[in-house]
Image: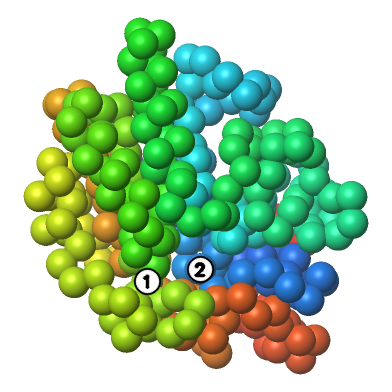
């Protein structure tokens, strides 16, 4: 048991090192082009690192069809910096390509797109409210093809203000799509301010349960071990005639003291001085691109 615990501790430590580097990537990417969305990208780093390193059964020999592998869809596509970094660090495309983020003729657009054929990207996203519907279509296709693989999707909490999300939520439960795991980045912030002031979601867990979903809540969305464990638990609940939802409470801007917990960094790039300050708080573990 002690050996197992030591291995587990070592794995978490390595994932945390990766997360630190991913955060450096995010900040440098948005700074270089003076645009982008660092806040929620920083807040979702643990989720992406845990998903791609330990949970998702994926293949870096990328195909759009994704047969016989798990699929992931990003609905809140504005947090593309964290996804691009994790895809590159996972081996989908060269890490050096991160320096082209939001540049002319880049495959790394501000919101993920498919026209550029970037490995790892299966849908254009960022028009909020659509990702869950796409994920459910993919999940249904997996069932029709008699594949045992799972479909994952990440949404924003502000995105829950879109009506299409709730149409999809009904559809999933009605069709017993128990091979889908949805996660909501529940940071309580959106571009115009705190969600509770813009348009309060009230009891989101109760809403999804009333729509027929199994709902898990994780209050420590920036704790790597907690995130890994909640994803494992969600996976264990698939195949039981109900879709699974994770409400993952994160802090927008996590990892950088002057960015954390505020909507002000939802869509603002740091200047030179702010970048230097932020990078000084994050260990360089895998080497900057």
Residue at disc 2, secondary structure: helix
From the image, which quarter does the C terminus lie in? bottom right
Picture quadrant of residue 118: top right
Residue 204 lies left or right of residue 140; in this view the side is: left
Give me the residue at 48% from left, 30% from top.
Answer: 71
Measure the alpha-carbon separation of dots 1 and 2: 8 Å
User: What percent of the width, then of the height, locates residue 67?
Assistant: 52, 15
Which residue is painted at 76% across and 37% down in the image? 115
Tag 2: Cα neighbours inside 10 Å, few (<14), some, or many (≥20)?
many
Would you say residue 45 is visible in this rendering? yes
Q: Is residue 55 visible?
A: no
Residue with the mark numbered 2: 40
Residue assigned mark 1: 187
Q: Residue at x 19, y 35 (%)?
A: 173
Seen at 35% across and 22% down, the residue is 140
Q: Quadrant of residue 261?
A: bottom left
The vertical placement of 80 against 172, above or below, is below
The location of residue 287, given as percent across then percent down, is 75, 58
């Amino acid at each position: 048991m002690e050996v197992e615990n030591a291995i587990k501790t070592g794995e978490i430590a390595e994932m945390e090192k990766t997360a630190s580097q991913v955060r450096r990537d995010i900040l440098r990417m948005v700074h270089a082009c003076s645009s982008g969305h660092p806040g929620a990208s920083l807040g979702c780093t643990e989720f992406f690192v845990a998903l791609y390193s330990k949970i998702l059964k994926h293949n870096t020999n990328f195909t759009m069809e994704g047969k016989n592998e798990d699929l992931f869809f990003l609905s809140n596509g504005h947090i593309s910096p964290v996804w691009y970094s994790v895809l590159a660090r996972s081996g989908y495309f060269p890490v050096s390509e991160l320096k082209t983020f939001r540049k002319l003729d880049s495959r790394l657009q501000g919101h993920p797109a498919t026209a550029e054929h970037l490995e790892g990207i299966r849908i254009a996203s960022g028009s909020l409210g659509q990702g869950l519907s796409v994920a459910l279509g993919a999940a249904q296709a997996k069932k029709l093809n008699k594949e045992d693989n799972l479909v994952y999707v990440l949404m924003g909490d502000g995105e829950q203000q879109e009506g299409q999300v709730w149409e999809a939520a009904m559809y999933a439960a009605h069709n017993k799509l128990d091979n889908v795991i949805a996660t909501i980045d529940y940071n309580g912030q959106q571009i115009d301010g705190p969600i509770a002031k813009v348009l309060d979601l009230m009891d989101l867990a109760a809403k999804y349960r009333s729509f027929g979903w199994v709902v898990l809540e994780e209050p420590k969305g920036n704790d790597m071990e907690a995130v890994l464990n909640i994803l494992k638990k969600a996976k264990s609940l698939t195949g039981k005639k109900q879709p699974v939802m994770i409400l993952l409470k994160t802090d927008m801007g996590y990892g950088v003291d002057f960015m954390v917990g505020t909507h002000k960094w939802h869509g603002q790039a740091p200047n030179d001085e702010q970048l230097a300050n932020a990078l000084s708080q994050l260990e360089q573990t895998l080497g900057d691109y």
